[in-house]
Amino acid sequence: MKKLYKPEDEMELSLIKSIFESEGIQYFVHNDHFGSLQIGPQIDLFNARMIMVPENQYAKAEELLSAYIRNTREDELESFKSQYSLAEKIRIVIETILFGWFVPRKKKSNNKNLL
């Protein structure tokens, strides 16, 4: 088995698993269930999940994974561009630089009938 990718969260892991299962690619997720039990920082050898595939299927798995990542990153970038105004983007950058984090604000709803 050869290490392929370290997913960022449970959702990404689930999507990658479903892609590999639909394509018939065998895989193993190191720390699959144990990693989700541990809160806090992800330490690679302790609780981080790692997707591993057989060496003979590595090229196909890498190709599928890179296509998935490329598509999701483009979607996230387009969503970010259309979702926030210039002032909000500047605020996000300043918060990230100063504090190392940011909190996106909820957009106000124009529909006053909703609770």
Image: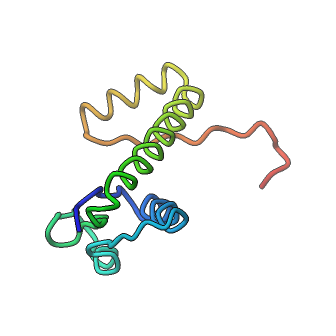
Residue at x-position 52% and y-position 32%: 80
Above or below, 46 against 61 in this view is below
Above or below, 42 against 114 in this view is below
**Is residue 104 found left or right of 100 in the rendered image?**
right
Residue furthest toward the top? 86
Residue 11 percent coordinates (x, y): 47, 61
Residue 22 percent coordinates (x, y): 55, 65
Please name whichever residue, 100 or 8, is drawn nearer the observer in this view of the structure.
Answer: 8
Residue furthest toward the left? 45
- Residue 106, by quadrant, is top right
Residue at x-position 31% and y-position 64%: 51
Please name whichever residue, 57 or 110, is drawn nearer the observer in this view of the structure.
Answer: 57
How does the figure colour the protein chain or chains? rainbow
Above or below, 40 against 97 in this view is below
Residue furthest toward the front? 56
Residue 99 percent coordinates (x, y): 25, 39
Residue 55 percent coordinates (x, y): 26, 62
**Is residue 23 found left or right of 8 in the rendered image?**
right
Residue at x-position 30% and y-position 56%: 5
Quadrant (top left/top right/bottom left/bottom right) for the C terminus: bottom right
Above or below, 65 against 108 in this view is below
Quadrant (top left/top right/bottom left/bottom right) for the N terminus: bottom left
Please name whichever residue, 28 or 99, is drawn nearer the observer in this view of the structure.
Answer: 28
**Is residue 89 found left or right of 34 in the rendered image?**
right
Give the total number of marks visible in the rendering. Answer: 0
Residue at x-position 49% and y-position 67%: 24
- Residue 96, by quadrant, is top left
